[in-house]
Amino acid sequence: MKRDLMEILACPLCKGDLELEAFEEKDGEILDGRLRCKGCGEVYPIEDGIPNMLPPDLREEMGR
């Protein structure tokens, strides 16, 4: 995920602004990290450069 994407992303639950925490970056891409909503506090993981913006209940269903 590129940092520029932060300009257009919003929390799918409350439409709040997101805060980025990057754990691993390579060549300007965030490979591992998380996005935290400043409004409701929900956390969205970034894995293999892809932010998982599904609401928590749908994330759990997809993992089964």
Image (cartoon, grey):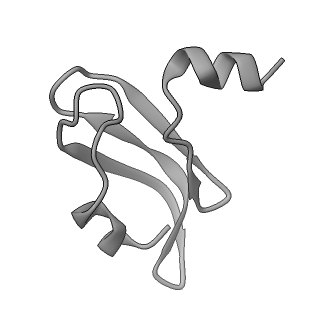
Residue 24 sits above or below residue 55 on the image: below
Position of residue 45 measured from the top left corner of the image (x, y, whole percent):
53, 39
Q: Which residue lies at the image location 18% right of the left edge and 43% below the top edge?
A: 17
Residue 23 sits above or below residue 40 on the image: below
Say which quadrant the C terminus sits in.
top right
Q: Which residue lies at the image location 46% right of the left edge and 81% below the top edge?
A: 28
**Number of numbered discs present?**
0
Q: Is residue 31 left or right of residue 8?
A: right
Position of residue 51 measured from the top left corner of the image (x, y, whole percent):
53, 51
Between 63 and 33, the residue placed more toward the observer is: 63
For this orientation, the residue located farthest to the bottom is: 27
Q: Which residue lies at the image location 31% right of the left edge and 54% below the top edge?
A: 9
Position of residue 52 measured from the top left corner of the image (x, y, whole percent):
56, 43
Between 20 and 4, the residue placed more toward the observer is: 4
Between 42 and 28, the residue placed more toward the observer is: 42
Q: Is residue 3 left or right of residue 31?
A: left
Q: Is residue 19 left or right of residue 28?
A: left
Position of residue 54 measured from the top left corner of the image (x, y, whole percent):
53, 34
Res. 4 image quadrant: bottom left
Q: Which residue lies at the image location 75% right of the left edge and 26% below the top edge?
A: 62
Between 29 and 42, the residue placed more toward the observer is: 42
